[in-house]
Image (cartoon, helix red, strand yellow):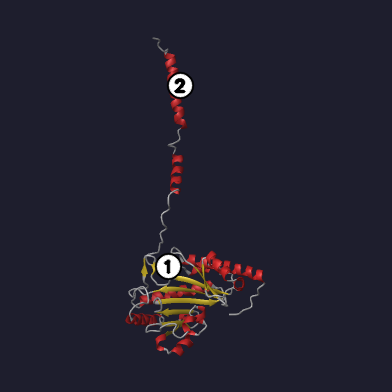
Amino acid sequence: MSQNHPMEEFLAGLSHLYKINTEKDWDISQDPELLKVLDIAKRLGQTQPPQMVYRPRNPIFDLLPTRIRRLVNPKASLKWCSASLQRNLAGFGQSADVSVTQRLQIENIMKKVLGVAFMPEDLTGKYTSLSNLNQREQGKLLSNELFTLTGDAWMKEPGAVQWTEGKGVFVNNYENFVLWVNMVDQLKLVSTARGQDIKYVLLRLQKAAVKIEEAIKSCQQKGFTTNKTGFAHSQKGVYGTGFEITFAMELPGFQEAGRAELDKARADLNLEIGPKGVPLCASVFTIVAKQSPEDSEHDIVTKSIETVDKLWKMDLELQSKFGVKLTRGL
């Protein structure tokens, strides 16, 4: 039986060792950079967890004056614009669906809050209990053009609202701010102006919200009712901010194009456009951007401005297409 020469054994071992090391050099399965990339790829393939809607423990109207001033007003040709807040008083529930006694308590609190002792000069005005007026007086009060700008002109029609005890409205002396008491919610603050200066409207609303909450707390009350998502209220389509913006504009191009064209724009831009009657006979349309639960006040403002400008440009194109001239007034 022949034996291998020691040199042959050495060379054979060296060859085997070289083969092992070579295979090891080519094995990159444990390479840290590769493992990092593989981990990222794995996570990318996973279903993302649902986005949490965060609201601060003590929510506020989260648009400070400095941020409002940095906004850019719409370029669209608007008839007017308004911004509103829905609120309820802590300790009195989450809507105006409360007892007559509680409604009267809320009304008395707000009469005091809205007095000259608490409100700055530009927010002072007059509160009126609608139940104390007869039908003719109610109609006369609500025929004020201001209520067209706030979207409340429909209330002047006899029987449109049951003016039970505790329901009323505050109007400031400049007639650009309204506060409803005990309607759908206990409080609805509305700031409005002609034209497209939504920044001016928002600055007034922010000031009113801060001053009113400060005054409510000065009257030994706890402020506004809140829940896990923000401010508690009953307004449909509005979430934890309780905040909504409305623009009003003429749409002669869409009126010429017809209902189907307007319905398509409404769907494409995710807008509420009213009135919804057929045919398109309204001289002025109201435009509201639909909201998502995670939208902040700033999101709602920027989304509203962007979409109303897009709608306006679409209408201009239709005017050009159909040879329409914008001649109607308010």
Separation of marks 1 and 2 at Cα, in angstroms: 74 Å
Which element is circle 2 on?
helix
Residue 25 x, y percent position in the rendering: 46, 31
List the residue tagged with mark 1.
Answer: 239
Instruction: Inspect this view and state whether residue 116 appears.
Output: no
Check the image and report above or below for 252 versus 116: above
Residue 77 x, y percent position in the rendering: 59, 73
Residue type (three-letter) at the residue carrying disc 1:
Tyr
On screen, residue 108 versus residue 139, left or right, reads left
Which element is circle 1 on?
loop
Residue 5 x, y percent position in the rendering: 42, 12
On screen, residue 322 versus residue 159, left or right, reads right
List the residue tagged with mark 2.
Answer: 15
How packed mark 1 is, by other alpha carbons closer than 10 Å (few <14, some 14-19, many 20 or more), is many
Farthest residue to the top: give it.
Answer: 1
How packed mark 2 is, by other alpha carbons closer than 10 Å (few <14, some 14-19, many 20 or more), is few
On screen, residue 42 versus residue 255, left or right, reads left
Residue at (45%, 29%) from the top-left corner? 23
Q: Residue 179 shows which numbered tag?
A: none
